[in-house]
Amino acid sequence: MELLSCLTLVILYGYVNGQPNFVIMLMDDMGWGDLGILGEPNKETPNLDEMASQGMLLTDFYSANPLCSPSRAALLTGRLPIRNGFYTTNAHARNGYTPQIIVGGISDHEILLSELLEKKGYQSKIIGKWHLGHQEKYHPLRHGFQEWFGSPNCHFGPYDNIKTPNIPVYRDWNMTGRYYEDFKINRKTGESNLTQIYIEEAERFIETQAKKQLPFFLYWAVDATHTPVYASPQFLGTSRRGIYGDAVKELDYGVGRILKTLSKFNLAKDTFVFFSSDNGAATYAKSHGGSNGPFLCGKQTTFEGGMREPAVAWWPGKIPAGVVSHQLGSLMDLFSTVLDFANIPIPTDRIIDGISLKETLLSNHITDRPIFYYRGNQLMAVRHGDYKIHLWTWTNSLEENKKGVEFCPGQFILNVTTHKQINHSSMPLLFNIAVDPGEKYLIKHTHPTYHAVMPEFQKIVWKHLKDLVPGKPQLNWCDKAIQNWSPPGCEELQECLKGPPSKPHLCVWPH
Ligand SMILES: *[C@@H]1O[C@H](CO)[C@@H](O)[C@H](O)[C@H]1NC(C)=O
Ligand SMILES: *[C@@H]1O[C@H](CO)[C@@H](O)[C@H](O)[C@H]1NC(C)=O
Ligand SMILES: *[C@@H]1O[C@H](CO)[C@@H](O)[C@H](O)[C@H]1NC(C)=O
Ligand SMILES: *[C@@H]1O[C@H](CO)[C@@H](O)[C@H](O)[C@H]1NC(C)=O
């Protein structure tokens, strides 16, 4: 009896204070077209399809950037990379990220979602790829997370540990091994058990929090669909799509396992779950890249294929089942939406680009707002309503293209998929994305529609640029000495390595 009333109190307490749990499942380089429910013809994502049928499918949802690190920094800060510093000024309109030679990372001046949740008593865990800088000052446990299992960088390698160290895998503050040494990825077969580990980590965390009856934030940042793509033996060779499909199938299985775990511990009705991806599928990775469905080009570009993401929201009893929303959404909205659901005020001392999607998710309301597409320091495109303008067009340089780097394989649109950076600012290119999701049919400058919609775009762009105070660029400097030679905890593992003397130089970003 006493136990029961105590339990009731805890449940009431949680409810009255509006402290639901949060699970953000962020895929790596997974494309809009990779889900069965979005038309992937092999229909190999039964768990995601079911998740969407039990929740809301957002068809017009965007990443904050066409590349991983900036997009992830934007998710956790609610701010465009140009504001939070995840961009470069080394060259015009270049995508930068956080390889292990990068000096920069997430600034202490930024307020992260995890930091605000921490103040409200949340336990937060990141599983998988952090990508917000690997030096000690950028460690996720210094930025609001209490637990971490995963890596600061991509799982590239194997390296020789002489010129380049193998990337460490952390458990909380310290490294617990390195990729290819302690956490194997077979580059020939694509076999790795990492996704299985990431699933078990998630289940264990949810179970522990359920037993403690304390609110949690799980950031499940898995990376099997990023090259080199990998899958465990039970999934290898099972997809009709090859190894990339094997990875998708295993992640889909993981999504199912996590949702089942929430239900098993009676947390489904108290947990807001959101599934999406950090940028479009890497079309240049050929058969090791995913699908961007009907959209133009892919990762690295500001065409729809670079930033339109699969997005599913799930919260049984709260978010109505089987609803499709055409709300223009962004990964940055997860910052504001989570804070709104947790009854935490959104910071007012700075511009937050994300908006709360609470009304969209609970009552299918549509909020009018623009989407900004950046490449590095350049605003490239803007979407508002069904229309999109390109202020600049660029795929990659002809030199890169001649080396075989193809961002838009099999796709050529005159004056759109350009290999030169073309400035259209004085006369932007216009598309109707609802009619023409593939950005194939330019609306002529002489067409009445062009004159009808352009003044509103001019206002949006003018206001955006007027208010813009770019953050200090974090992706300008590189240094081989900064690599993961001796991460915290390397002594115990006897995996400390000696790096070269410091020689900072400007990073080269070819795209
Ligand atoms: C994955 O796990 C299986 C079963 O435990 C094991 O046989 C296999 O060697 C592991 N693969 C890798 C690449 O670590
Ligand atoms: C399209 O490209 C062609 C060839 O480069 C050029 O002559 C033409 O002016 C361009 N049209 C527009 C609308 O930019
Ligand atoms: C792009 O074009 C606009 C409008 O003509 C101009 O103001 C701007 O300086 C140009 N930008 C660059 C980098 O050339
Ligand atoms: C982490 O590593 C440091 C040395 O870098 C060591 O002093 C500390 O005890 C380790 N912490 C844990 C929890 O293992």
Image (spheres, helix red, strand yellow):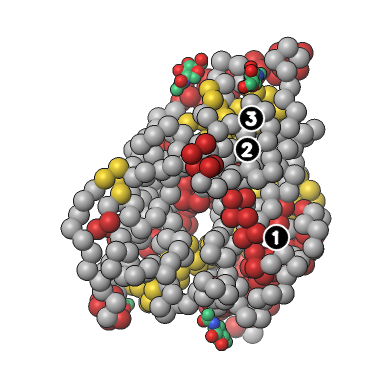
Between 341 and 324, the one lying in front of the other is 324
Tell me the kind of residue under disc 3.
Val
**Residue 416 has which mark?**
3
Q: Position of residue 260 (x, y in %)?
A: 69, 74
**How busy is the neighbourhood of tag 3: few (under 14 within 10 Å), some, or many (20 plus)?**
some
Q: Circle 3 — which element?
A: loop
Q: Position of residue 390 (x, y in %)?
A: 61, 27
Q: CA distance from mark 2 to mark 1?
A: 31 Å
Instruction: Relative to 320, say whether 233 is above or below.
Output: below
- The answer to the question of whether label 2 and label 1 lie on touching residues, with beta carbons closer than 8 A, is no
Mark 2 or 1, nearer chain start: 2
Between 200 and 393, the one lying in front of the other is 393
Dot 2 corresponds to which residue?
303
**Residue 315 has which mark?**
1
Tell me the kind of residue under disc 1.
Trp
Answer with the quarter of the image where residue 130 lies. Answer: bottom left
Q: Position of residue 328 (x, y in %)?
A: 67, 39
- The answer to the question of whether label 3 and label 1 lie on touching residues, with beta carbons closer than 8 A, is no
Residue drawn at point x = 75 percent, y = 44 percent: 294
Q: Circle 2 — which element?
A: loop
Instruction: Relative to 18, say whether 294 is above or below.
Output: above
Mark 2 or 3, nearer chain start: 2
**Residue 304 has which mark?**
none
Between 469 and 188, the one lying in front of the other is 188
Answer with the quarter of the image where residue 489 lies. Answer: bottom left
Residue drawn at point x = 37 percent, y = 63 percent: 141
Q: Quadrant of ligand 2?
A: top right
**How busy is the neighbourhood of tag 2: few (under 14 within 10 Å), some, or many (20 plus)?**
many
Residue drawn at point x = 71 percent, y = 57 percent: 34
Q: Circle 1 — which element?
A: loop
